[in-house]
DNA sequence: ATTACTAGTGAACGAGTAT
DNA sequence: TATACTCGTTCACTAGTAA
């Protein structure tokens, strides 16, 4: 889960990171003096200066110390820390018992579809999901704004489908999340590994395209239970 | 904006509130000993006990100090503090330059429609929005899960439309946010005062129901610029 | 078991100042 | 102007312990 350090970053650091992000330090370098940062953090110039040095030391920000004013920017690690807190808030405020993913039906059965239809997976789906899946997945391209919701879903337990080896070929574990599309029971399946995908694969007892009369390019709302 | 205190609540308190919310302290009382809380907050039992007393003193939580174990719950003020931070994160992660509000077309022209069509507003709309609005608003009932996005939109500047007095009757200021529905320019208008609504009113140069062939109950995505 | 008081310690902070 | 060092104070934390 965490390559270098497993300890959570102290709250005072994420607080500073958040304020830096709010003034634009996520996308690019932002010019901010230690005095200005001190004002937003409600502390002295000296303490803000120290905080910047600490954040640099923790590799949470990088700095371009110019002649007049320093410019700082969050590192990927710094952004990751903020994302963790953001996801905690999403779990607090967004999650009743489901998350709705908005997206568009995507072409054909992707690469994933081939894997998912392996017998080693299918028998587990039937046992753990309570329905025998139609052989084939519906691929939904997730709206850009909803891609972050996948992180939140992934942070919940889900239904573990074990990996297996068949004919000398190894298939990794996947996680299934029970879901509904237009009130029809289905499940979103994601590989145990792999991150940052914007396409989800959905399995269902029925042939979803036929049953719901949907085709490539149509918009769908996937209601995922959590 | 803030009735009692205008100072931001210290980070260490929102940190504790967040962790309490995560173990279920938002909806109802949750049983948690000071030792357990200390573990989640990464501090001693004694410090956690003190933190609880401080949060009680700040009216951010309430407690039911039973014989065996205390049970604590966030107060509305405590939830409000968390919401502030949540909205900061939304501004960081969700906002590129727009927010999409999902909703359903609602019946008729609500009460608000009458106000909005006053000449005192209409002339300002024309000048500040760049189009002469059709006389009438489209009411959209916002999906429950998207109601929070309205807070985020409200936290941005928008286009201020001043209040006025006409025929002895006073009309309050409203704020307009430029938006698009299916690529047609429009604007979401909200009263300067008032909070927690789940219906938004949309003005547009055209009669939206006719132009887009939409009617009551149809789903629409409103893309609001921020 | 709990919760929470008191006392002692160390870290975080700001003022002054060097660069 | 900047940033950032040293140093003295304060205050938040923990340990021990009472209730």
Image: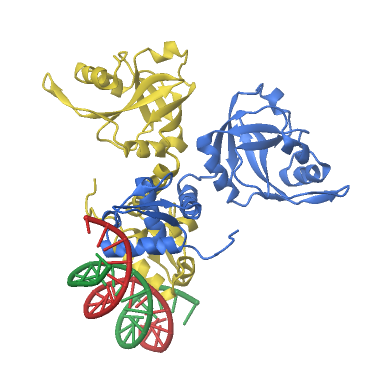
Chain colours: A blue, B yellow, C green, D red
Q: Nearer the viewer, residue A140 or B150?
A: A140
Counting the numbered discs, the total is 0
Q: Position of residue B30 (x, y in %)?
A: 46, 60
Q: Position of residue B174 (x, y in %)?
A: 25, 29
Q: Residue at x 61, y 41 (%)?
A: A197
Q: Residue at x 81, y 44 (%)?
A: A123
Q: Residue at x 51, y 45 (%)?
A: A96
Q: Position of residue A157 (x, y in %)?
A: 62, 52
Q: Nearer the viewer, residue D18 or A46?
A: A46
Q: Residue at x 27, y 35 (%)?
A: B194
Q: Quadrant of the N terminus of chain A?
A: bottom right
Q: Position of residue A146 (x, y in %)?
A: 52, 38
Image position of A180 (left or right of A136): left
On the question of residue B72 being in view, the answer is no
Q: Vertically, is C9 above or below A205?
A: below
Query: Going by the picture, which residue comes out furthest to the top?
Result: B210
On the question of residue B47 being in view, the answer is yes
């Amino acid at each position: 889960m965490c390559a270098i350090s497993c300890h959570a970053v102290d709250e005072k650091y994420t607080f500073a990171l958040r304020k830096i992000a709010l003034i634009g330090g996520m996308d690019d370098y932002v010019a901010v003096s230690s005095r200005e940062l001190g004002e937003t953090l409600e502390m002295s110039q000296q303490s803000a200066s120290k905080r910047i040095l600490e954040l640099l030391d923790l590799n949470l920000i990088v700095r371009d110390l110019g002649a007049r004013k320093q410019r700082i920017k969050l590192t990927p690690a710094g952004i990751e820390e903020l994302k963790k807190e953001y996801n905690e808030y999403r779990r607090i405020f967004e999650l009743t018992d489901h998350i709705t993913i908005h997206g568009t039906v995507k072409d054909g059965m992707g690469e994933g579809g081939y894997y998912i239809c392996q017998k080693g997976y299918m028998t587990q789906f039937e046992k753990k999901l309570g329905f025998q899946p139609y052989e084939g997945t519906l691929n939904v391209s997730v709206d850009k704004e909803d891609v972050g919701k996948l992180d939140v879903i992934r942070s919940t337990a889900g239904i573990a489908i074990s990996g297996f080896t068949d004919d000398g070929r190894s298939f990794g574990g996947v996680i299934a999340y029970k879901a509904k599309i237009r009130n029809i029971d289905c499940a979103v399946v994601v590989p145990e590994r792999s991150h940052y995908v914007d396409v989800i694969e959905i399995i269902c007892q029925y042939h979803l395209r036929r049953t719901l009369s949907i085709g490539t390019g149509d918009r769908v709302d996937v209601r995922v239970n959590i």
